[in-house]
Amino acid sequence: MSSQAPPAIRLRGVVKRYGDITAVAGLDLDVPDGQCVGLLGPNGAGKSTTMRLLTAQAIADEGEITVRGHQLPQRSKPARAEMGVVPQLDNLDTTLTVEQNLVVFSHLYRVPKARRQAAIERVLDIANLTERRGAKVDELSGGMRRRLLIGRALIHEPRLVLLDEPTVGLDPQVRQELWALIDRLRSEGVSMLMSTHYIEEAERLCDSVTIMSHGVAVAVGAPQALVARYAGREAVEIYGSPARLAEAEAEMAAQGFPTRRTGTSIAVLGLDDADGRAPAGERRPANLEDVFVLLTGEEIS
Amino acid sequence: MATEALTTPRRRLDRTAIGGVLVREIINFSSYWRSTTFSSTVEPTIYLLAFGFGFGSLLSSVNGFRYVEFVGTGTVATAVLFSSIFPAMFGTFVKYKFQRTYDALLAAPVDTEELVTGEALWLAMRAAVYGCAPMLVAMVFGLNASWGMLAVPFINFVAGYGWACAGICIAGRLNGIENFNYVTSAVITPLFLFAGTFFPLTGLPQWIQTIAQLNPLYHCVQLVRHAVFGLWGVVDLWNLGYIVAFGVVMWRLGIYFLRNKLID
């Protein structure tokens, strides 16, 4: 991708209020062309609202949004024509067959008549559903439905795809299957914005992640860079009774080391320059989850 | 890019978008047409038979028509009403709330205006066809064929469009499908009964006749009868104008209410 290409998505100072609640509170977000960006955040951080803003199903109160160079909400229709959307909640037509669902979307996304059949075959192949093309959606497994939902968003060969919690509620092996599918799109240079609260998903698939909390971006960067910056190379896990954990927490705070509770232990972070001051305990590589919890103050559910 | 360029920035009522909404409905229809066709045609036919035989045995003629002819033409409008307003109310609600279809459509290059227009056009087409069922049944019982009958599907289409948009308004305005009962009992039932379908309004007190003039269904009934019996007159311009105006007003209101519901 040339560096001249406009960013796939660009948000500046975006605010969205619902009555007294400010769901998005001055968000800046960039998805450079050809990159996969993860939007990480706990429930209620504003991820879903951000996704709705990008399809103009919610209209921002303040700020600027451009999608593939189109200013929203005025130019939202051409923007929507150029992107694919994978919703969090399955909205397939369940009494129709796999193929009929794709026919409907080939019309909605204006695939020219001459190319319609080829587009459908291509998606059936990507979603690995060629054999099940005649099956009603009702008869498909959860994983197949999800593959169809992703495939459906690709019917018009979009260069930008929005994925809202693409693997939520799925079995681990189904999740891995979808990761392979998403990774394939990424290797083809499709720009993606993926909201998720699965840290591993973001770590594996995203070139860059934006961590959201209370409607704003609290950290932006490549997953490894964020880990290095906020958590350091290694974490030390201290186990013990609740009293012992509280004590260790206070001790580390006094020394200026960030900590997080993991439920059964305290993880001490930011130990790169600790030298001899590092506490005794189980060492492990620091990860994006440490950063997430540190920055959002939320436990992973 | 396999997508046709969308060059005009704010083109309203884009035909391709409306076409996409229609294609979705048509393909879906292939999976449920039997039950819908059954209820949309059998129900008014039962009304026709019940009233036709029930009152028909008491009355030899109404306003100069045989009673079965009177009711057979009147229930055309009933069939149009039932086959457009109810599917619009329930369909809109289900697609918005339970199937989340509208989320998918609005994420595609389709705006609320095109969504409402497409849905209403589809229901109007269906109502145009279903509305003819009572007339065909009445023909079995002696209603004479006439050239004016060819106008009936068109009258049905115009009326059906308005009723479909009215149904979309109701679904867009009300929270909760249980509230539909209020509308059905307080609005639709009186509209359906005071439209000159089963009995002529001329026998009713003047004030009811005046109010009935506001009922679009009354104008639809008049148009259908005048078409079938070849009684076209200047008053039909008023009748037609009224249902066209009703359709336009409901269409704009439907878009307004549904946009409020779908776009935050």
Image (cartoon, rainbow, N blue to C red):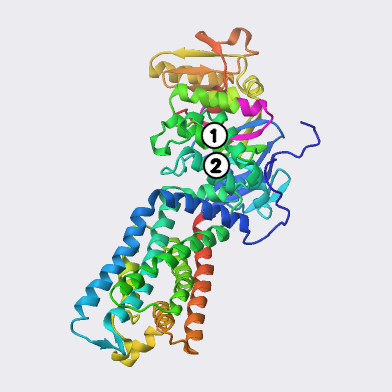
Name the kind of residue labelled 2 in the image: Gly
Alpha carbons under labels 2 and 1: distance apart: 8 Å
CB-based contact (under 8 Å), mark 2 and mark 1:
yes
Where's residue A270, x and y in %? 60, 18
Where's residue A111, x and y in %? 63, 45
Whether residue B35 appears in this view of the structure is yes
At a point 45% along the width and 53% down the height, the residue shown is: B96
Name the kind of residue labelled 1 in the image: Gly
* Dot 1: element: loop
A266 or B47, nearer to the observer? B47
2 and 1 marks on the same chain: yes
At a point 31% along the width and 81% down the height, the residue shown is: B70
Residue B138 placement, left or right of A150: left
B32 or B118, nearer to the observer? B32
Which tag, 2 or 1, sits closer to the chain's start? 1
- Callout 2: few (<14), some (14-19), or many (20+) C-alpha neighbours within 10 Å? many
* Dot 2: element: loop
Task: Residue B133: name its quadrant.
Answer: bottom left
B29 or A267, nearer to the observer? B29
Which disc number belongs to residue A41?
1
Residue position marked by numbered label 2 in the rendering: A46
- Quarter of the picture containing the C terminus of chain A is top left
Subunit of mark 1? A
Q: Is residue B104 magenta?
A: no
Where's residue A55, x and y in %? 60, 47
Residue A115 placement, left or right of A5: left
Find the residue positioned furthest to the bottom.
B206
Subunit of mark 2? A
Where's residue A202, x and y in %? 57, 27
Whether residue A154 appears in this view of the structure is no
Magenta range = A184-198
